[in-house]
Image: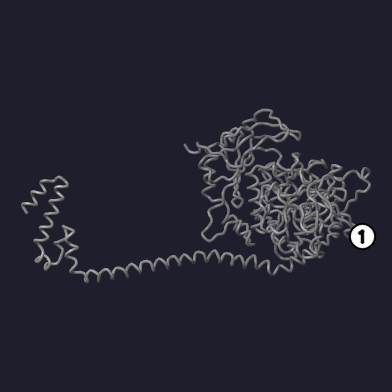
Amino acid sequence: MPFSKYVKLPGSEREPMPGATKTGGVDPNEQMMVTLILRPRPAGRKQPSLDKLVASGQRISREQLAASYGAAPADIEKVSEFAAAKGLAVAHVNVGARSVVLTGKAGDFSKAFKVNLDSYEHPGGSYRGRVGVVNIPTELSKIVRSVHGLDNRPQAEAHFRIAPDPQANPAAVSYTTLQVAQAYSFPTGLNGSGETIGIIELGGGFTQSDLNTYFSGLGISPAPSVVAVSVDGAQNQPTGDTSGPDTEVMLDIEVAGAVAPAASIVVYFAPNTDAGFLDAINQAVTDTTNKPSVISISWGGPESTWTAQSLESYNSALESASAVGVTVCVAAGDNGSSDGVNDGADHVDFPASSPYSLACGGTTLTISGGTISSEVVWNELASNEGATGGGVSTTFALPTWQSNINVPTAGGFQGRGLPDVAGDADPTTGYQVQVDGSSFAVGGTSAVAPLWAGLIALFNQSLGHAVGYLNPTLYQTIALESGTFHDITSGNNGDFSAGPGWDACTGWGSPEGAGLQTALSAGTTPTPTPTPTPAPSGNARPMRTPTPTPAPIGRARPTPTPRPIKRPKPAPTKKRKPAPTTKRKSTPTKKPRPVPAKKQKTTPKKRGKTATKRARKTAIKRGRRSAAKKGRRR
């Protein structure tokens, strides 16, 4: 019977949320959605793997991603057969993301994946959860890479911090996004025209009236175009609560929109679950309608709170973004070097820790006369007001482009260091926003991700092409040039301290926008050549490796040639040794007849006598007396 034998899905182990209590089983008739990530289709003979393609600096279109690296039709069909056999339905297929979304009842999903689904309560609410591993049929063991959505616990946190009441902290100040952009010398004369900024949101919503109020207050009219895209059924739904996700949504839109007011902004709303977050990233990366050239993510959580399969699948989605030339700016977290985990160890935030993310850390910025008068690492942990995330990944190995910056080890593991860049994040020097009809100041690394996303949109407009996967170029050339970053050398985020050059608090520092634009512009001639030209040249080298295949073919031809050469040589040897053949041919008793007739006349008797003697000896030895008698008769 098909789909009856099961195996464990590696990396799918789950534990209950800290502080969660099981309250009972789930309703078996509850409707739910589950996302399966499949393997990539087999690569062509001359096709590089996706990681090699990205490492070489090559880029492909979203359509090419689907055609060459997407899910194979046969694999999608096999998953569809499995779904039908288990009473489930295929709701959506994203070939480029290699994802298949299934819908059905909780009871059927529980049987289909051999898991127990239960209801849990935790301090922040309730969720449907599972414990242990997910099981999949043996027919899918080589096809399915990960399964998401059986468990719908809140996977990520928004990384914003509302500024304290001014009366409680009279020293607190706030800035408009334009003031921050000016202090960071963002290039002038650019507005992001022709670019699209994608923003991932896991709850809340925006109102056009708030946007109109905010942007008109900055003298930006009309307000930037903002479009909401639904992922897995989530919608633009403002809660009316400024302490909730509405503030995250408005902060992201308002900061990015103020920096690049002519850019189109597309907000992908998804459920705050393991499946929803992943589906939102995949949809933004593979979106052939809106085609964002840069994505901003202000949500995340400690690496330790993710399953191994999720870390792998999210990282794969971000790698695909790099392959199609999309920069992904991700907030590095607001809880210092521990990332809010109370185990005494250092932790970093994911997906910022992915090597395909531009991880954005935070500073405390003081502006005077439109310029920076002071900037240090953001750390208000003493007053419980947060601190920039940063540290060393215990999941992702040190990338080659970070090999020369002395990233500290994490428990002996040489991991990816973060953040990569930084910007103003302290709530006490925060950003003025408009949310749910109210105006107030907000900070957090949530503000830094859209700030950088807006800046990159300006770069893309200026260059005439997307910056794309910035990290390798950033570390190997751009950050090493003077005038590209404001180096933060004072402060710490707990266990890591700032210093000259890159550090695990603020990365390379806050941006010198005009200097970065100049460095990128100077690299536009070499950069596209390393992208298209070394791309072909990179392909040409692998393509030359098949050319050695003619080499083996050429070698195969000489090998037969020696054989024909050796065959004529034995022929003359037979002609030269006719006389000795009398002695040689006396040994094979059965081959006297083929010997030339002349020799048979001179030596027949001798051969007969010797033959009979040998026959007798053989007969006696074998005990064949009948053979001996026949020999006497002869």
Q: Is residue 370 above or below residue 128?
A: below
* 38 or 368: nearer the viewer: 368
Picture coordinates of residue 37, whole percent (x, y) = 60, 46
Q: Residue at x 74, y 67 (%)?
A: 521
Residue 565 shown left or right of residue 495 in the figure: left
Q: Residue furthest left?
A: 633
Residue labelled with disc 1 = 369
* 140 or 629: nearer the viewer: 629
Picture coordinates of residue 492, whole percent (x, y) = 82, 50
Picture coordinates of residue 187, whole percent (x, y) = 81, 64
> Label 1 neighbourhood size at 10 Å, few (<14), some (14-19), many (20+)?
few
The amino acid pointed to by label 1 is Gly
* 556 or 585: nearer the viewer: 585
Q: Residue at x 10, y 58 (%)?
A: 608
Picture coordinates of residue 488, whole percent (x, y) = 82, 56
Question: Can residue 256 be seen?
Answer: no
Badge 1 element = loop
Residue 317 shown left or right of residue 496 in the figure: left
